[in-house]
C-alpha cells in the first residue's frame, strides 16, 4: 500500500493577505512634491557627485544615467520653487 506523500508547493506561498501593507508606512507629505522640501536638492547634488565619480572611473554610461537622475531632481526642485526651468549645470 502506497503512503500519501504530499510534495511541497512550488512557487511563492499564497499567504500575502496576512502581511501588513508597506505603502501605508511611508510618510505622507502635503506639498505634493513626493518628499520633504529639501530632499530634491540633496538628491540632485548626490546624483551629480555620483555622475562625476563615474566619469573619473571611466564609465560614461553610468555617468549619463546619474546625470539623467540629477536632471529629474533638478526639474523637481524648480517645480517646487515655481520658477522657469533652466538647463542644469553639469
Image: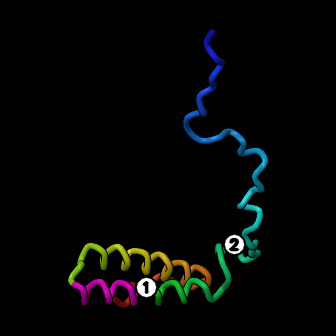
Q: Is 35 drawn above or below residue 4 in the view shown?
A: below
Which residue is tagged 2?
32
Q: Which residue is located at x 38 percent, y 74 percent?
A: 68
Query: Where's the C terminus, which quadrant?
Result: bottom left
Q: Nearer the viewer, residue 74 or 1?
A: 1
Toward which corner of the image does residue 64 lie, by quadrant?
bottom left
Does the segment drawn in magenta span residue 44?
no
Residue receiving disc 1: 86
Question: Magenta segment: does it hold 51?
Answer: yes
Q: Where residue 78 sits in the image (x, y, percent)?
A: 54, 83
Image quadrant occupied by the N terminus: top right
Residue displayed at 38% across by 78% down: 66
Label 1 neighbourhood size at 10 Å, few (<14), some (14-19), many (20+)? few
Whole-percent x, y for residue 74 in the image:
48, 82
Q: Secondary structure at mark 1?
A: loop
The relative height of residue 13 versus residue 23 in the rendered view (above or below) is above
Q: Is residue 52 left or right of residue 7?
A: left
For the stretch drawn in magenta, the main secondary structure is helix
- Estimate the spatial distance between the alpha carbons at disc 2 and disc 1, rounded to whole Å: 22 Å
Residue depicted at x 46% and y 87%: 46
Q: Which residues are magenta?
A: 48-57
Q: Position of residue 69 (x, y in %)?
A: 43, 75
Q: Nearer the viewer, residue 26 or 13?
A: 13
User: Horizontally, is 20 left or right of 81 in the view?
Assistant: right
Amino acid at each position: 500500500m502506497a503512503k500519501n506523500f504530499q510534495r511541497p508547493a512550488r512557487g511563492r506561498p499564497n499567504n500575502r493577505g496576512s502581511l501588513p501593507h508597506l505603502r501605508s508606512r511611508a510618510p505622507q507629505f502635503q506639498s505634493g512634491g513626493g518628499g520633504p522640501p529639501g530632499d530634491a536638492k540633496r538628491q540632485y547634488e548626490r546624483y551629480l557627485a555620483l555622475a562625476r565619480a563615474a566619469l573619473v572611473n571611466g564609465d560614461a554610461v553610468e555617468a549619463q544615467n546619474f546625470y539623467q537622475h540629477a536632471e529629474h531632481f533638478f526639474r523637481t526642485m524648480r517645480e517646487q520653487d515655481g520658477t522657469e526651468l533652466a538647463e542644469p549645470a553639469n
